[in-house]
Image (tube, rainbow, N blue to C red):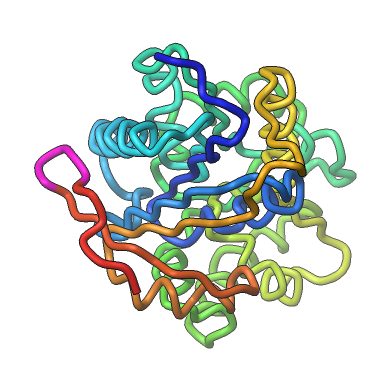
Amino acid sequence: MAKPDRSAPIGIFDSGVGGLSVLKAIRQQVPDETLIYLADQAHVPYGPRPLEEVRAFAVSITRHLLTQGAKIIVVACNAASAAALQVLRQTFPDVPFVGMEPAVKPAAERTQSGVVGVLATPATFQGALYASVVERFAQEVTLLQHTCPGLVAQIEAGQLDAPQTRRILEDALLPMLSLGIDTVVLGCTHYPFVIPLIENIAGPGVRVIDPAPAVARQVGRVLEARGLLRGSELPGDRIHFFTTGDAGRLQSLLPQLIGEHGAVSCLEWAGDQLRLPLKAI
């Protein structure tokens, strides 16, 4: 594989809109970079799916992003990171990857009560990555876990402060609060979009940890270490959005979720491969 040049784009993918929380942080961290964002909304959510199925999606999406010239792949999805990050690194050994790791370590370091809540999807909780993080960093704290059924679908629909969204979060958080949590770990990239609602339910005494800024810093470090940071003298500062779902629906959510507009192109699955864009809006 030829080494990508500095002007090559950063490839970012998620099952849906959740990874936009990571994209937004990356854009702030390395504003001169060109970004390709791929939302596999034909298969959203990944969380309840078998790990092997998520792994297959991740490999195919990575292969497609590499055909688009991506110089680094950001797996902006906790479920895909849990299921596939190790396999991706083995399958594409020359490609730098940055994935999501549940922020259990900083939560364990910062908690005063010794009780931490973790909100994540089933695939994340089932993955070896989460088990490893818990074993290494959370032996001295109590972790309370909840999968928040239906929350990803609410966020995909743009229902960030709807009554049903509040009910889902209350079902998860109120029992945790009664047991003394003072920290909440967001183990799904969709969940940062409902931080205001989480904070409203949990109150000012509970810290909410969004992993996106730390992931963006890691992307910057990897690019710098490999000599792949795009300099400000190079033309760039563009984002290309793709979805395997409804392009119009994703386009309509961009101003709400990341504060800007963008054209969205459609892709379609053909077996285990992604076709080139069929249309753009």
Give the position of the C terminus as an image quadrant: bottom left
Name the quarter where the N terminus is drawn.
top left
At x 70%, y 31%, the residue is 229
Residue in the foreground of this view, choosing between 234 and 57: 234
Please state the horizontal and vertical placement of residue 16, each as a whole percent of the image. 41, 58
Q: Is residue 162 left or right of residue 55?
A: right
Please tell me which residue is depicted at 37% across the width and 57% down the height of the picture.
242
Q: Is residue 12 left or right of residue 139?
A: left
* Residue 46 against residue 92 in the figure, above or below: below
Q: Is residue 177 left or right of residue 274?
A: right
Q: Which residue is farthest bottom?
A: 163
| Prevailing SS of the magenta stretch | strand
Residue 185 x %, y %: 67, 49
Q: Is residue 80 above or below residue 241?
A: above
Residue 220: image quadrant is top right
Q: How many marks?
A: 0
Q: Which residues are magenta?
A: 270-274
Q: Which residue is at 42% across, 77% downward?
A: 157
Furthest residue in direction left, as rendered: 271
Residue at 27% of width from left, 39% of height from top?
A: 57
Q: Is residue 107 magenta?
A: no
Camera-nearest residue between 260 and 81: 260
Q: Position of residue 30 (x, y in %)?
A: 73, 44
* Quarter location, residue 272: top left
Q: Is residue 281 above or below residue 41?
A: below
Coordinates of residue 103 in the picture (x, y in percent): 68, 39
